[in-house]
Amino acid sequence: MDVLARVDEALEVARRSDHGRHAELLVSDGPLRQSLITLIEGVELPAHNSPPAASILVLRGEIEIIGTEPDLLTQGALKALTHVRHGVVAKRDSAFLLTTVTGIVGTDSHDERKL
């Protein structure tokens, strides 16, 4: 699968969406999930819990991770997501690959700190 080839199509779907976003699951293997997520400039994913393990790779655009320590990520940036509640805001039309590991018995998804 050519993930970069999917970015333009996924951004077009997000532009047509009432919510300005689109997500599609690319890989699902046991607890591993990899999703392509696109957000149109200004769109925010509200604060949510993080899974036991996650990383984000920006494929296009610029996003801000909002949590205990806001972080601006641009194309090519790779970041491990912390185990705290966080949100995402698109500073420009953006696409990112979200890799998560879910459903691991005995692991918490986040700590109790609030944004």
Image (cartoon, rainbow, N blue to C red):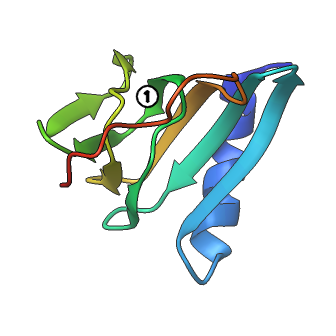
Q: Position of residue 77 (x, y in %)?
A: 34, 18
In the image: residue 66, left or right of residue 15: left
Amino acid at pointer 1: Val
Mark 1 secondary-structure assignment: strand
Q: Position of residue 27 (x, y in %)?
A: 83, 25
In the image: residue 10, left or right of residue 61: right
Q: Residue at x 64, y 76 (%)?
A: 17
Q: Position of residue 9 (x, y in %)?
A: 73, 49
- Closer to the camera in the image, 75 or 106: 106
Q: Residue at x 14, y 41 (%)?
A: 68
Q: Which residue of the protein is positioned furthest toward the front in this rendering? A: 106
Vertically, is 59 above or below 13?
above
Q: Quadrant of residue 60?
A: top left
Q: Position of residue 62 (x, y in %)?
A: 30, 40
Q: Quadrant of residue 105?
A: top right
Residue under numbered circle 1? 58
Q: Residue at x 74, y 27 (%)?
A: 33
Q: Residue at x 18, y 55 (%)?
A: 115
- Closer to the camera in the image, 68 or 1: 68
Q: Quadrant of the N terminus?
A: top right
Question: Would you call the spot at circle 1 few (<14 residues within 10 Å), some (14-19), or many (20 or more)?
Answer: many
